[in-house]
Image (tube, rainbow, N blue to C red):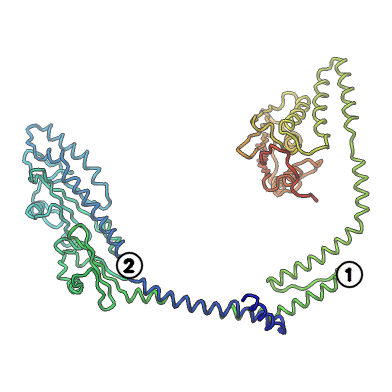
Amino acid sequence: MRRWIESMIIRLTRTMNLRSKIVVFFGLIVFIPTVILGVGAGYLALQNVRTNYMLTIDEAVRQTTQSIQFRKQSYDLLATRAGTDGELISRLTRTYAELADQIETVNYVDRSFQVMSRYLPGIDTFRIYHTNPTLVEDGGLLWKPDHRPLAGVDETSWYQSFMDSPSALRWTYVPGDTAQLIVSRKITNGGGSVPGAIYMLLDYNSVFGELMDRPFRGSGSLYLLDEQDRIVAASDRSIIGKPAGATELSKLMASLHNSESATVNGEYFTVRSIDGEWKVAALIQMRQMEKQSAMTVYSIVAITVFFLFLSTCLVLIVLKNVVLRIRKLGGRMNDIAQGDFDVSVRSRNRDELGDLELMFNQMAGRLGTIVELLSSAKLQEKESSFQALQAQINPHFIYNSLSLLHWRALDQGDQFLVEAIEALTTFYRFALNNKTNVTLIKDELEHVRAYLDIQQLRYPESVRIVWELDENALELYSIKLILQPIVENSYIHGKIFTRDDAFIVIGIKRCDDRVRFYVRDNGIGMSSDTLTLIQNGEKAGKGNGFGLSNIRERLDLYFGKAGQMTVESTPGVGTAVTIELPACTDKPRIQQEGL
């Protein structure tokens, strides 16, 4: 089947030019399939939304009901915990003859329930009312019912009304104030007597405001009804405290016909039971929500069609210049094939063909440069060989000469000269070993010590050397000459020997699979311009080839991005150079050829 389709496409496009082929392929591969998939996906999405709409609504109602139930149960649990506290009941029912006993009870209540009243948000007032004539009221948590005003009523009226009610726990609203709720809980002992009551004044916004205000993204309403079908909380706060039968809920609840939910005139109404006889009623405007979903699907289809139309126009515009520009490139390539490298193509557009034209121009220029380089390659090779022969140093001649001077100094008893020659011997033995560019870290340190010995002889007791070495790193491999040039910069450029209390810190630390080298001094530092050049990898000042730029190049040559060097310096304060590279138990090798 696949081969048949391929053969058919080849036959259809065999006689077409490039522009026609692009248009045909765009139509077959992009335009037509996208239109079919877009229309089909939009239709299926709309059908799927309608099919699962009720499930989505039911899930939203279920989650909202659970949230309301959790909020109510949290405050019920707090009130019940206080109302059934055995110690509190015992203290409220005992007879007090001494003031000290009353004070002890007050302290217990404050200690036990002051923190409890802050467990949940929105508790404006928390009180414990009692009628024990031998126990005082402290005006804090302990109160006795009196004719004082209490959230729209007086204390005595509220207390008596609550004690006469059959409910042990009751939620009520504050008359004339829909921003507060009252939770009352009787304090009952095992014998059935009621020595008091818990009173909590709640802030409506903190308890139910977030859930009730604009539920279901503003497309519905919520109602919380108690066991007497009185509205405790609602999206419309004006009906809080009213019986459900006196509001619009009466007609809606009548439409249920002993079922849990019903759809009436494009509105979905459902009632869910919580905590026994309490209920949560939800009214959702299905027409508005379905309209929003349908508009979303239609918007997706419209946007898809718009972008298809736009992409078609753009393809047609681009095609006007594609073939012409390709022909120009072909002509210039033919010129290069004839040996004319001084050619270029004018690029006006920053697109794929424009990039190709720029790369063609660069290629033509590089080809001309390569031809010129090849013509002088042999001369440069001979010149480089001659310079290499001139730069060679015979290490054996230097070692023999230093050995002769060493024995001569010993014969004459010149200890200073002996130490200087020994340091020079160690220094050059390492520096002139051209057999390898890789060494053990401990050998690199020996080379640095030799250089420092020479400098210490030159500037005795002028610079304090601090070594911070990790013994676990000494047997690892590193590239040669990465520490000595940095230390040398401290003397040459940092003028460390001119500073008071001069010091150089040389450290090597191993951190898992990384090794960190660092050299810090308190020399004269470097200017911001010089530091910028070094941080950019450019060579700063005059050097002998083993400066910071050389170290950076060799790190990149052996370790790539895994080898890093950072330089920090402050004029008048000092310089810190840090080098990080992989911990190598084997000799590292060059990753790329240098130029």
Nearer-the-camera pick, 246 or 272: 272
The amino acid beneath tag 2 is Phe
The residue to which callout 2 is attached is: 216
**Do tag 2 and tag 1 residues touch (Cβ < 8 Å)?**
no
The residue to which callout 1 is attached is: 339
To which quarter of the image does residue 427 belong? top right
Against 188, residue 11 (above or below) is: below
517 lies left or right of 296: right
Which percent across, then down, holds residue 541?
78, 44
- Name the element at disc 2: helix
Kindly identify the residue that appears in the image at 26 percent across and 70 percent down.
283
Residue 24's mark?
none
Pointer 2 or 1: first along the chain: 2
- Name the element at disc 1: loop
Nearer-the-camera pick, 333 or 576: 333
**Which quadrant of the figure contains the N terminus?**
bottom right
Which percent across, then down, holds residue 275?
20, 57
Q: How many marks?
A: 2
Against 160, residue 284 (above or below) is: below
The amino acid beneath tag 1 is Gly
The alpha-carbon separation of the residues under discs 2 and 1 comes to 76 Å
To which quarter of the image does residue 524 belong? top right
Kindly identify the residue that appears in the image at 38 percent across and 74 percent down.
292
